Image (cartoon, helix red, strand yellow):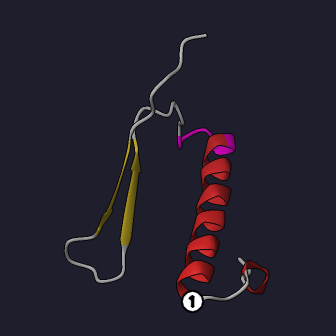
Amino acid sequence: MEKITLNYKIGEHPEIKNRIIVAFDDTGIDLNNLEHHHFVDILAKVMISELYAKANNIPIENIKF
């Protein structure tokens, strides 16, 4: 199988301090599909929990969502 390159961008919001913007291109995810939307929601919750724990030097177990 041919390997696929997936593109994404990471940056800071130009006007809102401490807001991280992550953009994923061409994933095939359809946010109108409830199953896809739920998957992205869970992914975002895991990402924000991990980022917060890392930035604040606390164990991930101490984060809930």
> In the image, is 65 to the left or to the right of 13?
right
Residue appearing at x 56%, y 74% in the figure: 51
Q: Position of residue 18 (x, y in %)?
A: 36, 81
Q: Position of residue 16 (x, y in %)?
A: 27, 80
Task: Between residue 8 and residue 57, name the one nearer to us.
Answer: 57
The quadrant in which residue 42 appears is bottom right
Q: Position of residue 11 (x, y in %)?
A: 31, 63
Residue appearing at x 61%, y 48% in the figure: 37
For residue 11, above or below residue 65 = above
Q: Amino acid at mark 1?
A: Asn
Q: Position of residue 36 (x, y in %)?
A: 63, 42
- Quadrant for the N terminus, please: top right
> In the image, is 12 to the left or to the right of 61?
left
The quadrant in which residue 29 appears is top right
Q: Which residue is mark 1?
A: 56
Q: Residues within 10 Å of mark 1 (few under 14, many from 20)?
A: few
Task: Between residue 62 and residue 44, name the one nearer to us.
Answer: 62
Task: Between residue 46 and residue 39, name the one nearer to us.
Answer: 46
Report if residue 5 lies within the magenta region: no
For residue 23, above or below residue 5 = below
- Quadrant for the C terminus, please: bottom right
Q: Residue furthest top?
A: 1
> In the image, is 17 to the left or to the right of 8?
left
Where does the magenta region start and end? 31-35
Predominant SS of the magenta segment: loop
For residue 31, above or below residue 46 = above
Q: Helix or strand or loop: what does disc 1 sit on? A: helix
Residue appearing at x 76%, y 87% in the figure: 62
